[in-house]
Structures are given as structure tokens and as C-alpha cells.
Image (cartoon, coloured by chain):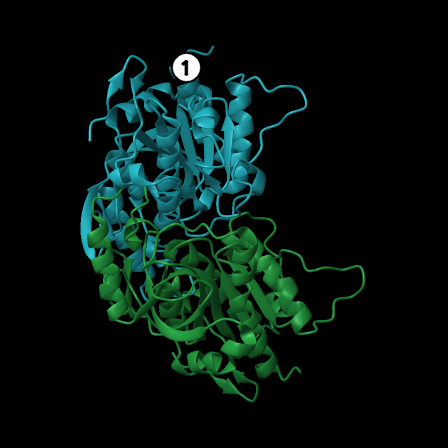
Chain colours: A cyan, B green
Amino acid sequence: MEAPRTRTGRLHQAPNCHLTKMNKDVLYHLALDTESHNFRKMFSDIKFVCFGGSCTRMEKFAHYIAKELKVPIPAGLSIENIAKDTDRYVMYKAGPVLSVSHGIGIPSLSIIFHEIVKLLHYAECFDVVFIRIGTSGGLGLAPGSVVISDCTVDGRLNPYMELVSLGNVQRLPSTPDANLAQQLLSLSHPIQDGFDTLVGKTMCTLDFYEGQARLDGAFCDYTEEDKMTFLHRIHKEGVRNIEMESLCFAAYCNRANIKGAVVCVTLVDRLKGDQIDTPHDVMEEWQTRPQKLMAKLMKSELGIE
Amino acid sequence: MEAPRTRTGRLHQAPNCHLTKMNKDVLYHLALDTESHNFRKMFSDIKFVCFGGSCTRMEKFAHYIAKELKVPIPAGLSIENIAKDTDRYVMYKAGPVLSVSHGIGIPSLSIIFHEIVKLLHYAECFDVVFIRIGTSGGLGLAPGSVVISDCTVDGRLNPYMELVSLGNVQRLPSTPDANLAQQLLSLSHPIQDGFDTLVGKTMCTLDFYEGQARLDGAFCDYTEEDKMTFLHRIHKEGVRNIEMESLCFAAYCNRANIKGAVVCVTLVDRLKGDQIDTPHDVMEEWQTRPQKLMAKLMKSELGIE
């Protein structure tokens, strides 16, 4: 479905014709509804939605990006969790940026993605860009490196998400926007940044332990040799990091006709080990790295010095 | 793998032989590790682990069950979140009961299940029972009814979970413990309780909207007639409720040789609608219903009046 173009860009519309028949829509997992809240007034200026797994990380990101984008916040006010009447997800607004948590895994991401797309639809937003800023396990990379996904694949290296609906399976292509990935790469600068940023293939799994060939879960019926053979095979196929949401994120961006990118920092080199045991403060700094790239992108797009 | 039996019951062991080779194990998503924490001292008395999606619900459950089981709490102390150094999950201990959040969906549940099984393994617990107390959509039931699962199926009615590991797919049988389901049913009493409790088949999906045949997501390419045909078909096949974790929960209990049950309250009758729009206080009361059944089970098992 091609949305109408206007002088301000492409109107953001949810591709579900049933929505027009509803008098009221309850976005249950955000604890917001179209009757009690004026979405147009609250959200029509949104240009970027950033998603991440952790609630506190997304709260910190909202404060960080507000400062970077010089979002004016009147004295005596502060950024608050707009979804505070639920504990399922958090959502913060910093000027034209929404910062949203998605929990862990595709099903958890799927719910909030549906509800954010509807929110932007009711708010009549234009030209919104979605970015997942997350954490991942790396393959053959120094921990702390940042991977921008040019392709997302499932645990069997398929470049699509299988969606089961009404007992049938649909395959949804999961390749992120190539131009946005290249734009993000062009904004990185290893020497100034102090860390490597690269474009690569991302594997998205349904499980953290066996799904990612770890030996340290409660269950494991393969050997260390099996594990290493698998990890070297996927590394050879171009996989540079492994996480748990990118497949759905990229597939749903494609379906919603939204420009999207997946930018994840790596917390461990899986060719060297399974456990994540880096000191807390180091890990905290690593997790700000995708955020710094976001600040560069948004300043460039919004014309902020 | 059959665990050794002793006079106090069956020792709880994680079926992964690689664990014995590790000097230290970091349970990353609980922010606990075997070096900094004495798991045996902290957790060896655990007899029940209750899992639920929401952090605040599982906090409230810990306080409720502590009161019901008359767990002595010294003056000046209170129950606290043991996993407070992470925001991914919460975990509370009320005497012999752990109350743990699992987030939304199979991948999120899978991680915490792995880490709780390892925790009990290191703590050398005996005869632990796992129960998911959750929320769900009902089929042909008055909202507020409680369903104890005697069978869990995926979105295509298959009674197994497909686990992708090292690029291969394993099928894990997902039928919960029949005796425990019947024991729980026998503890319910519709007239005294003020709500219906029944045993039935539970469908577990990877998505809340299209996966559960809703018309009110951001995406929907089927008609209301397609939806109703599907829901009536699965109802005829014995499905009484739909949620997003039971398949993995039951499958992993089977693998770990742990007695497990899935007990969910229904928040909406999906044969009548999609949206969850019941007043907050009514929904709060409904969500305590599986908890009340837990109190009865635990009192009965622990010999508490």
C-alpha cells in the first residue's frame, strides 16, 4: 500500500483497513487509547522511533538525545514514561524522538511494534524512521564494536521471518533499508569514535542459549566442537552478530513501508566464549555507542549543529 | 536423565554436562553469579517457582503468598527483588517460593527458564514444582475464568515446541503434568471461589495480534469471517485459551524433569471481541485468581492450615 505524498512527506499509515471501523482503539500494552488521549496532539511531530530491549537503557537514551538535540524542556518539568500505567513496556518522548523498550525476543517486539505503528497512524505522522539500538553477541569482532545490519537472517540463515496466522505460515522478507545502513556507516569514524562500526549480517534467534550455540545453558546436547563448527560456518556466511529481535523488526518495517535500521553493540566475541562477564561500567559505556550514532544521524537529518 | 533419589526427594539437576567444567557461572539476566553468591545458602529451601509475565504482578504475588504461607519476616525487613541489578527480569523469594517475571513470549521465557533451572541446580534443591500463573484470551468462557492447561499447542495446533539449534530443528513435546493439572482442578470450587476453573487445551502463539487472529493490529490481511472461522475451528478442537509462553514452559519442564503446570486467567472472550477494555480494578482482581489457587496448592503440599 503506497501512502499519499504531501508537501511534508509520506503520511504514516497502518496497513490494516479494519482500524477505520473502530470508534476507539485501546493500545493495551502502552495503556493508552484513542478516546482518552489525543494522539495527534501528543505525537504528530515524531520523526524517529528508537527501540531497545531494556527499560532503563531507553529511559537514559531519552534524556541523552533530548540533550544532544537541545530539546527545550520548561523549568520544573522532566521527561516521563508515557506508558507508566503498564509495566510491560516504557515509552519516552524527547522532542521528535520516541524512545521505546521492546523487551526480549520477537514476540515481545512484535506487540510493541504493532502498537507504535498504530500510534503513529492515529497521530498522522510523516516520514518516520525506526531504529533498533540494541545489544548482541559478536562473531570475530572486538567486544564493544557496533554492527549495522545489512541483512537479518533466522537461526537457519533464512532471510525472512515466518509469521503464523490463522494456522498458515507467511514469509516476510527481512532485509533492512540499504541506504539508511550506508548513511549510518558514513556517520561513523573509528578513530574519533574510539570503536569500530561495520555493516554486516545479523542472525536473529528465538533463544539465547541453545539458539545461539551456547554451552552454558540449563540444557545442551551438543559438544564444544559442534558449537565451534556452527559458529565458524555462520561467520563464513557473513554473520557478524547474533541477537533476538532484528528479523521481526526489519520484516515489519518493510511491511509498514517504514525506513528502518538495526544498530547493535557486541558484548562478547562468541568465537572466544559464551559468558558475558565484562565489568558493569565498561558494558554501560559500550551500550551508549549505538546511541552516539543516533545522535549524529538525527542532528544531520534535523539540521542541528 | 534420571536424577538420584534421596530420602528428601529428587535432586534437581540441570541436564547439561558442560556446567561441571565451569569454575564460575554468570546468570547474566538475573545479575547473579556462582562466585559472588552462595546459591545453596540462598535458595536450597525452594519448593515452588511461580512465573508470570509482569514484574509488578510477580512482586505482589510474593507479598501475597508470604502472607498466606505465614512466612516469618523479621521486623524491619521486607521482601526485595533479588535480581535488582538488572532490569530484564525480577525475582522475589517468599519462604519456599520463588516469584519470577518472564516478560512476554517464548524467547523471553526461555532465557529465564534456563537461568532458574541452573540456579536450582547450583542450590541443590529437591522436588521443585514450576507453575506459570498468567493472563490469556479465552474462547467461549466468561472473562475472569481460570484455565489449567492439560495440553499446550502452537499456532498450528501442534503439541510440541520447535527448537532451532545449530541450524537444526528439534521437536520438544509440550504436554504438562496431568496429575498436577488434576490436583489443581480438585482444589478449585466455583461457588466458593466465585469464578469458574476448568482444564483445557491452551494455544501458544508467537504474536498477540495476527498470531491470535485479531483484527485490531497494525497489520491484518484477513477478514472478520476468516478470523471467526479460525477461532471456532480451534475452539472445536478443544482450545480454551490463547497466550504466548505455555508451549515452551511445558516443553522445558518436561526436558528438565520438573513437574509443571500452566494456570491462566482469561481477560476477554475472543469469540466476542479482540480488545481488552475491562476496568483496571476488575482486571486486577481477575489476575489474583490463579494466585489464590497457588495458595491452596502450596498450603496443601506444605501442610499449612
| Residue type for callout 1 | Leu
Badge 1: chain ID: A
The answer to whether residue A167 is visible is: yes
Q: Quadrant of residue A9?
A: top left
| Residue drawn at point x = 72 percent, y = 59 percent | B78
Which residue in the structure is indicated by mark 1? A302
Q: The N terminus of chain B appears in which quarter of the rendering?
A: bottom left
Q: Position of residue A40 (x, y in %)?
A: 43, 26
Give the residue at x 61% y 68%. B43
Front one among B65 and A295: B65
B60 horizontally vs A209: left or right: right
For residue A7, above or below residue B295: above
Q: Is residue A79 above or below residue A31?
A: above
Of A146 and B72, which appears nearest the observer? B72
Query: Which corner quadrant of the image does residue B159 belong to?
Result: bottom left
Say which quadrant the C terminus of chain B sits in: bottom right
